Image: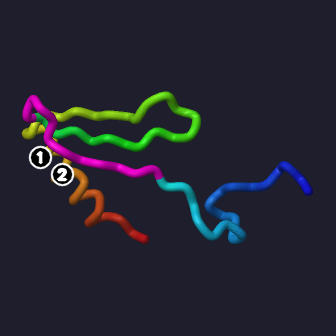
Amino acid sequence: MSDDFEWSAANEDIVQHSVQGVAAYINQYGNITIRQERGWDDDQDTIVVLTVESARRLAEKLKELINSYQA
């Protein structure tokens, strides 16, 4: 058995790709917090904190990107 297994998205043998959890909530200071679950080799979660206005602009940008996405 080889240790050179190809874990890329192009490998049709893979039936479940890894996905880290993502949470969004308002923190104690009234800011929007986006938190991604740490990976097996990370010491802590990744956290992004945005003001409400910045989060609103991000949401609009995400909508724009989603609407222009060509699958």
Asked if residue 23 lies in the magenta stretch, the reply is yes
> Where residue 67 appears, x then y in whole percent?
26, 66
Label 2 crowd (10 A; few <14 / some 14-19 / many >=20): few
> Where residue 27 appears, x then y in whole percent?
15, 36
Callout 1 amino acid: Arg
Callout 2 amino acid: Ala
> Where residue 58 appears, x then y in whole percent?
20, 46
Label 1 crowd (10 A; few <14 / some 14-19 / many >=20): few
Rendered image: mark on residue 59 = 2
In the foreground, 15 or 61: 15
Q: Do the residues labelled 1 and 2 touch (CB within 8 Å)?
A: yes
| Residues rendered magenta in the picture | 20-30
> Where residue 28 appears, x then y in whole percent?
12, 32
- Hey, which quadrant is residue 41 in on the image? top right
Q: In which quarter of the image is the N terminus?
A: bottom right
- Hey, which quadrant is residue 6 in on the image? bottom right
> By what rule are the colours in the image chosen?
rainbow
Residue visible at 66% across and 56% down in the picture: 8
- Hey, which quadrant is residue 9 in on the image? bottom right
The vertical placement of 12 against 30, above or below, is below
The vertical placement of 54 against 60, above or below, is above
Residue visible at 45% across and 50% down in the picture: 20
Does residue 9 appear left or right of residue 70 in this picture? right
Residue visible at 67% across and 66% down in the picture: 14
Q: Name the residue under label 1.
A: 56
The vertical placement of 16 against 33, above or below, is below
Secondary element under disc 1, as helix, strand or loop, is helix
